[in-house]
Amino acid sequence: MADLFDTPDSNTGSKGTPRPLADRLRPAALSEVIGQDHLLGPDGPLGTMLSAGSLSSLVLWGPPGVGKTTIARLLADETDLHFIQISAIFTGVPELRKVFEAARMRRQSGKGTLLFVDEIHRFNKAQQDGFLPHMEDGTIVLVGATTENPSFELNAALLSRSQVLVLNRLDEEALVAMLTRAEAELERKLPLTAPAREALVTMADGDGRALLNLVEQVAAWPAQTPLDTDQLTARLTRRAAQYDKSGDAHYNLISALHKSVRGSDPDAALYWLARMLKGGEDPRYLARRITRMAVEDIGLADPQAQGICLQAWQTYERIGSPEGELALAQAVVYLALAPKSNAGYAAYKTAMAAAARTGSEPPPKHILNAPTNLMKEQGYGDGYLYDHDAEDGFSGQNYFPDGMKRGIYYLPVERGFERELKKRLDFFVHLRAKRKAD
């Protein structure tokens, strides 16, 4: 029976309109898929499933244009399953019920169903739960596609019944192979110089579909001589970098920025800062996170770091973009080259854990104020030693709750200004031991 995918000619649609190049080059077998050998090779998860003749439900996680839909369609062909494709954007509960009912009737007649759900992360949790009974009884083999991290976007129950496979962004080698295949389909080379061909591949930014769309545009240009890079970029707009300010890329890039600063690499830190700004990230968010880096990873090893971050933040607020972003960049460089210490951060977390363990233990009475006679009778302030009256301005008294073992939380490092703080701390530790012995 004819369906929407039947065409009278390999290069034209049902009304004689040309088919897009990306559609004409869609692989007809899994062996033709480019860039995902880690999944499709003999030892890869899909290769192993197919050789065993058993396909489980899957979640394909990867960026746009890397072959998620194509792989799902070819898996149905390889396993002789009826292929149904829906999008979570356009499909509601009534449509899902019809899909499940049709799959159930198909199964009764001896034919299985591979249900491909594009953008599966856009279904809410209740809708995701609706797939579970049909997966469990074998009515459908679910193959979901998502560009978002499944750990955050999909139900634990759905994930437990599926295998998550990560598709790679297409690298330069894969894109060049796709470009060669496109030129073979067009039966001619693109009118580009070698550097311009490299620029075209770079413009695709790891997206195979985007590359083929760019190829199709270039192929339509009348050109007597090969175009150079400047001529190419004048005619084509570079594909916007993939960046979702609330999605997985957002968290990946801020993590890369933070770890580059922590790793004392100013060049890498500037690169990730630029990537986020180019992607449209709010500079105020970056200012807040940069200040956090100063507190968490530099701390008292360089007490100026936090102030520099706050000044950069204030500078941005006063002069705005793009000039204010330079202040953030300079703060990032300062942080990357500053001495590093998380001693204050670690001490805070350890103290918080100790506070949680000890509950409502009161302070020792000798360090409590006694503004009333009753409180004095209860021993408040009794025995308190005023440190300014003591030798070296240090009494060495206990300030922890009675009966609680003294905690040691702050362990400064031998870097930056904390080297000086460590000397001071060691001095008071020695003096406290001496006072106790006396």
Image: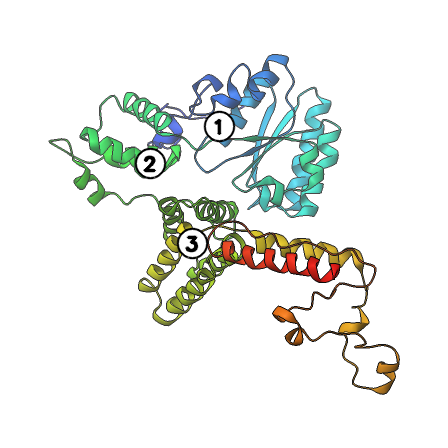
The CA span between labels 3 and 2 is 42 Å
Q: How is the image coloured?
A: rainbow
> For the residue carrying disc 2, how many other residues have a C-alpha within 10 Å: few (<14), some (14-19), or many (20+)?
some
The residue shown at (70%, 65%) is: 396
The residue shown at (37%, 72%) is: 318
Residue 270, how many percent across, how many down? 37, 49
* Quadrant in the rendering for residue 109: top right
Q: Is residue 83 above or below residue 203?
A: above
Q: Closer to the N terminus: mark 1 or mark 3? A: 1
* Quadrant in the rendering for residue 390: bottom right
The residue shown at (66%, 21%) is: 111
Pair 3/2: label in front: 3
Q: Is residue 398 above or below residue 336?
A: below
Q: Closer to the N terminus: mark 2 or mark 1? A: 1
The CA span between labels 1 and 3 is 45 Å
Instruction: Indicate the quadrant containing the C terminus: top left, top right, bottom left or bottom right.
Output: bottom right
Pointer 3 residue: 335
Residue 302, how many percent across, how many down? 46, 58
Pointer 1 residue: 70
Please give left or right for residue 176 compared with residue 130 in the image.
Answer: left
Are the residues at dot 2 and dot 1 in contact (C-beta closer than 8 Å)?
Answer: no
Under circle 2, the secondary element is helix
Residue 409, how many percent across, how many down? 66, 54
Instruction: Indicate the quadrant containing the N terminus: top left, top right, bottom left or bottom right.
Output: top right
The amino acid type found where label 2 is placed reads Asn
> For the residue carrying disc 3, how many other residues have a C-alpha within 10 Å: few (<14), some (14-19), or many (20+)?
many
The amino acid type found where label 1 is placed reads Thr
Pointer 2 residue: 213
Please give left or right for residue 438 compared with residue 231 in the image.
Answer: right
Q: Of 301 and 271, which appears nearest the observer? A: 301
